[in-house]
């Protein structure tokens, strides 16, 4: 089912669909697990998108410049990217559940600090603490799915998690805009605190440990160095993880440019961020639903190919429209719906193919994969989006370049895999 995995690696033992777990919390069912893992993954978009509509209010309250406030997002993303390299390795060594519970406590502390910040410098510090803890659910959740399920079942559950998770990028800025209109920006972080407390209680009571002690990896420098070196020396890892990272970059450039693009190019207010985020989320949801339906019926390679038809068509149409017309609703945002539909068709297959390159250390692989995506996102937030946000045409051209780059990496990965297979014969 995974023809892209290197032939010289030991075969991945097929786990049973419902393994016997050690006594502990009453395990969640398949749908309950999907809801919890999706909620844990929501910390990322909530931390990025929820406070975007409050930027003018935060600038005034903390006497910060727009650039200083933009750097609070960059600080969060850099911390997120740096720590996702370790969430998976920690979970391979100490267990999935323990890492998630500790990360939720750290996130709550960072969120309290953000709500109480009295200067932009303090906001940076506590955004870093949020960043180092917010990615645990995203990374460890993927490993949990592969601990429990195999092949098509894993793809279905991952796409189900994506469908539930997809409401976050739309809900976050809408809730943030609504909160700013009735309260102040600090209330946004207090709402995040409440969300983290609820999730901690649910995970403490119901989230099982899916990695038994006898399957855990040593946590020492020599062993970690060996694992990271093996992953980072793999051309297939870089090619396949780059597919997901570049596809997401094509969406993220619009998301991080939204505080400038929506008011200046489309003349929208803080409560109108849904014009960008609702089409984005609708595409993510429906694309994940399509991926869920085709899992096990077509090959992963064909699924990724279909996804790129939508990705490239959307990006080309977006560039063509803005070459001929000024930005206007709804035409400026409709291609985003088609783009995210294709992105969600590609992501589950590309993610699982990457995780299965090194089946014994999937947590560490998930960390490295998430690091690639997040590091690129940090560069987009700090450099690319500010440079392109003055023009929707420039943003659309950037999106086309990212999507084309993702397709190029996928084709290179397939060609490289064929060469490996030919050498084996």
Image: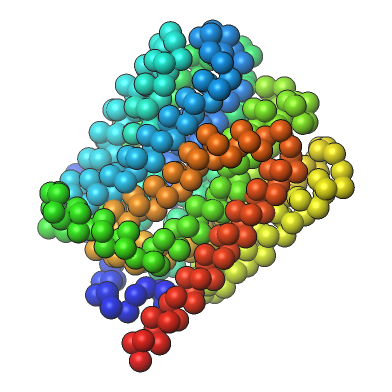
The N terminus sits in image quarter: bottom left
Residue 392 to residue 62: above or below: below
Residue 112 placed where, x, y %? 37, 17
Residue 372 left/right relative to 257: left
Q: Is residue 345 visible?
A: no
Residue 215 placed where, x, y %? 16, 59
Residue 94 to residue 346: above or below: above
The C terminus sits in image quarter: bottom left
Question: Residue drawn 29% across and 53% down?
Answer: 363
In the rendered image, the residue lying farthest to the right is 324
Q: Nearer the viewer, residue 27 or 231?
A: 231
Residue 62 placed where, x, y %? 51, 9
Q: Nearer the viewer, residue 137 or 198?
A: 137
Count of all numbered marks drawn on residues in the image: 0
Question: Residue drawn 32% across and 31% down?
Answer: 104
Q: Is residue 386 visible?
A: yes
Question: Residue 276's quadrant in the figure?
Answer: top right
Question: Residue 395's quadrant in the figure?
Answer: top right
Question: Residue drawn 52% across and 34% down?
Answer: 382
Residue 283 to residue 119: above or below: below
Q: Nearer the viewer, residue 406 or 30?
A: 406
State how the image is colored. rainbow
Residue 206 left/right relative to 41: left
Question: Residue drawn 72% across and 22% down?
Answer: 269
Residue 199 placed where, x, y %? 36, 32
In the rendered image, the residue lying farthest to the bottom is 425
Residue 185 left/right relative to 144: right
């Amino acid at each position: 089912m995974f023809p892209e995995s290197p032939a010289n690696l030991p075969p991945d033992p097929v786990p049973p669909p419902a393994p016997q777990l050690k006594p502990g919390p009453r395990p969640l069912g398949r749908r309950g697990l999907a809801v919890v893992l999706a909620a844990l993954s929501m910390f990322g978009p909530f931390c990025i998108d929820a406070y975007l509509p409050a930027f003018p209010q935060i600038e005034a309250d903390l006497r910060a410049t727009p650039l200083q406030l933009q750097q609070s997002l960059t600080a969060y993303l850099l911390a997120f990217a740096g720590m996702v390299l370790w969430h998976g390795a920690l979970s391979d060594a100490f267990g999935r559940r323990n890492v998630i519970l500790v990360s939720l406590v750290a996130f709550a502390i960072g969120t309290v600090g953000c709500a109480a910040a009295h200067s932009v410098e303090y906001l940076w510090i506590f955004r870093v603490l949020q960043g180092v803890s917010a990615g645990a659910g995203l990374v460890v959740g993927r490993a949990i799915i592969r601990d429990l399920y195999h092949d098509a079942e894993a793809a279905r559950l991952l796409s189900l998690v994506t469908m539930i998770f997809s409401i976050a990028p739309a809900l976050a800025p809408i809730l943030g805009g609504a909160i700013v209109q009735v309260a102040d920006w600090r209330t946004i972080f207090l709402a995040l605190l409440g969300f983290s407390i609820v999730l901690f209680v649910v995970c403490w009571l119901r989230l099982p440990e899916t990695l038994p002690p006898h399957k855990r990896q040593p946590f020492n420098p020599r062993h970690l160095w060996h694992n990271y070196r093996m992953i980072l020396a793999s051309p297939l890892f870089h090619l396949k993880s780059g597919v997901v990272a570049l596809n997401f970059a094509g969406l993220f450039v619009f998301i991080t440019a939204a505080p400038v693009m929506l008011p200046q190019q489309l003349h929208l207010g803080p409560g109108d961020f849904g014009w960008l985020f609702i089409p984005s989320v609708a595409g993510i949801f429906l694309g994940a639903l399509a991926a869920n339906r085709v899992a096990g019926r077509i090959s992963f390679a064909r699924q990724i190919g279909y996804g790129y038809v939508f990705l490239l068509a959307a990006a080309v149409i977006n560039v063509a429209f803005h070459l001929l017309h000024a930005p206007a609703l709804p035409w400026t945002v409709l291609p985003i719906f088609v783009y995210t539909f294709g992105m969600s068709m590609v992501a589950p297959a590309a993610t699982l193919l990457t995780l299965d390159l090194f089946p014994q250390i999937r947590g560490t692989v998930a960390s490295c994969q998430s690091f690639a995506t997040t590091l690129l996102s940090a560069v987009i937030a700090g450099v690319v989006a500010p440079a392109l946000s003055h023009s929707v045409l420039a943003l659309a051209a950037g999106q086309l370049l990212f999507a084309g780059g993702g397709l190029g990496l996928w084709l290179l990965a397939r060609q490289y895999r064929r060469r490996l297979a030919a050498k084996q014969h």
